[in-house]
Amino acid sequence: MARIIGTDNPLSDDQQRVLAIVLDLIIPASEDGQRPSAADVDVLGYIRESESHTLDGLRAELDQLDAEAFESQGEAFTSLDPATRKALVDAKREREPHFMRTLAMQTVTCYYQDDRVLEAIGVGARPPFPQGYEVPSGDLTLLEPVRRRGKVYREP
Amino acid sequence: MVHSARDANHIPSVPDRNTEQYGGDSREKVMADDVVDVLIVGAGASGAAVASSLAETRMRIVCLEQGGWMNPAEYPSNGRDWETRAAREMQTSPNLRKRPADYPINDDDSPIAILNFNAVGGSTILYSAHFPRFHPSDFRVRTLDGVADDWPIDYGTLEPYFAENDNNIGVAGLAGDPAIPAHEPPLPHIPMGRMGEAMGRGFNKLGWHWWPSDSAIITRPHNGRGECLNLGPCNAGCAQGAKSSADIAYWPANERAGVELRTHCRVREITVDNRDMATGVTYFDADGIERHQRAEVVIMACNGVGTPRLLLNSTSARFPNGLANRSGLVGRNLMLHPWGMVAGVFDEPLASNFGPQGCCILSQQFYETDVSRGFVRGYNMQITRGVPPVGTARGGIAQGTIPWGDGHHGAFDRLFGRSIHLGICCEDLPEEHNRVTLDPDLADSTGIPAPKISYTMSENSWRMLEHGLARGAEAMEAAGAKRVQKASSPLRWAGWHLLGTARMGTDPERSVVNEWGRSHDVRNLFIVDGSVFVTSGGVNPTTTIQAVALYIADSMKQRLASLFD
Ligand SMILES: Cc1cc2nc3c(=O)[nH]c(=O)nc-3n(C[C@H](O)[C@H](O)[C@H](O)COP(=O)(O)OP(=O)(O)OC[C@H]3O[C@@H](n4cnc5c(N)ncnc54)[C@H](O)[C@@H]3O)c2cc1C
Ligand code: SF4
């Protein structure tokens, strides 16, 4: 979570805390501890760099989530128990699918380019180039039936 | 003086032809008002091939290309964030990509969007390099199936040029494919991987044809280039230089052979005199300055959309409807290969995300006509690799197959590396109403009218596509896929293959160029790109485009003394 809290952060402290909770609801850490929670990768950094036009909307939606928590539960979103937070976020997903879908897309886009995640899913914490990957050449004996059937094109 | 437009970061080869290094030979000096022997417009797949063949004549050859050199060191696969960068920087549609070299294309009136790339290497910068040849029957569709027209040339005519091109650029494949006349790809086939084997077993179960695809990717070092590293993102540019894009596979050698390539030069029109001979082209150089380059011969290689666009923009008193357009066929008969897609998800891990994205194996079981299927002609099935991590997750979220929360990781793991795709490349028959015209309102940054596409799919294509989707699903199931999904087809973002808009033929009323690529109306104007295709075949066209370009170049060389008769 430390990675999304910084002095030049475009979100207020409250907004950052709400965001971290929502991100953790989208992708929690894996049980084996190999894959981090989405709250622990730099989703906000990704949004700022690649989709900064969505920042205003993000701020407004996070504020609204907090306001809804106050309205319905009389508490800040961050003070609620996990089940109530999830229920509020689920309700928002129903009501405002576009915003939540955008945030989920941004989250996975950032998440699946994070070193720890790339390592955990087996592609390695590195760019594809220059190391590349091994791909087995394949068993050419599988082609025997195709060879046996012979020519399949027309000779005009 | 003509702008010497070599981009930074490119490996230098020949000295600048404006310098003293070429000595006092005035023939070598390229002045704005000089007459060059051959002027090629477009440095993509076909422009590169034609230049390569003509270079041995020692004629003065200049190629004008509106884009610059790409720098493989800057391709997305050099970074961990390659999926984001590929989506941002290497969009396949010029309308979304909007690089300075791009021109807009109005494709609102087409279910299939037009895709290309504008740089040295042209669309091969992005292509998958899937390289199956046309079949002999593709050149005889009227005779065999009673539709469209026969080509004025045949497979035998092109056979030596297919082989020449394979050797020039480096093509990988496995000899012995019974779906195509015997040929010997110069390099060993692309690795099939476990996914290729799985699909091969599926095709075997059904008793269908399949074979490792010919691929314009080098699997062993070739002409000083390093072999494929199975990175995957070939469609975002190949950082290794293993993909035989024309900038890597042709242009360095072309320049060493003396061809002058002027980048960032955008041609506006081809000029003609009152004897109906092309006199050269008017273009904007890298600084936006309008220039005229005179030439003895003009060769168009701007692809099946770019070439008719320029011909239609080249109007004059003698050619009020566009240059070389007395037949009225320039821009007509556009063929795009309607594309279907079937995805399969397998239980077992296949590491399907590794390896060249678009190249693995193919099936041509339904390539040749069988009228009992309810349509004529046929299609190719192209097996392509799985989806990389971000793509897998985004697709899963969009389709609801990867949930939020606790189930996320398990669902991702059940998809990632376990999906296989099957593309259906349908032969598109020529129809005059499918066409490229000039948009009355839209223009590029230099004011040249943008092309406007009007395109609908025929009943025959719809039936073929339906058939392909059903057979594709059958193949996936036979291969053991646990979940099979047919994408909504034709895919919109699949206008990769641009063909037919300046067709070849012997009858000047029914075709734009003759049987060796020369315009019927303008005897020193040639067209070498996919515009000249009479029919589209049912396969990715670039090996055939380059073979046609080499054949036209050879025809020109053989007729040098009587080229304009
Ligand atoms: C994403 C993608 C994937 C593909 N995959 C495959 C595949 O797997 N197999 C296959 O066979 N084919 C594939 N293709 C198609 C293949 O790239 C084309 O068939 C091939 O590049 C066409 O060659 P060309 O010379 O006709 O045109 P291009 O390669 O498009 O080159 C045309 C050149 O002309 C230049 N030009 C245009 N107008 C002007 C002007 N006014 N002035 C100056 N220069 C101009 C352009 O900038 C461009 O460089 C793919 C294409 C795309 C976009
Ligand atoms: S898979 Fe091979 S051809 Fe494709 S980008 Fe990687 S090295 Fe290049």
Image (spheres, rainbow, N blue to C red):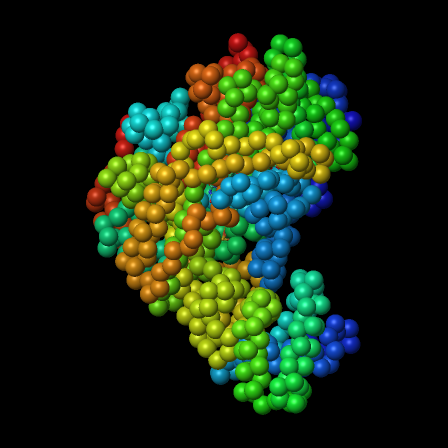
Taking A25 as reference, is B19 left or right? right
Q: Residue furthest left?
A: A148
Q: Quadrant of residue A129?
A: bottom right
Q: Residue at x 58, y 33 (%)?
A: B306
Q: B129 and A82: which one is in front? A: A82
Q: How many discs appear?
A: 0
Q: B23 and B455: which one is in front? A: B455
Q: Residue at x 52, y 51 (%)?
A: B234
Q: How far from the left and from the top, in percent, is residue B214?
A: 40, 43
Above-or-below relation of B95 to B536: below
Q: How far from the left and from the top, in percent, is residue B42?
A: 60, 32
Q: B298 and B158: which one is in front? A: B298
Q: Residue at x 57, y 31 (%)?
A: B437
Q: Quadrant of the N terminus of chain B?
A: top right
Q: How far from the left and from the top, in percent, is residue B429?
A: 40, 33
Q: B422 and A17: which one is in front? A: A17
Q: How far from the left and from the top, in percent, is residue A53?
A: 70, 62
Q: Residue at x 70, y 72 (%)?
A: A59
**Residue B530 appearing in the image:** no
Q: Quadrant of residue B121?
A: top right
**Residue B233 appearing in the image:** yes
Give the image quadrant in which the ligand numbered 1 is located.
top right
Taking B351 as reference, is B439 left or right? right
Q: Residue furthest front?
A: A71
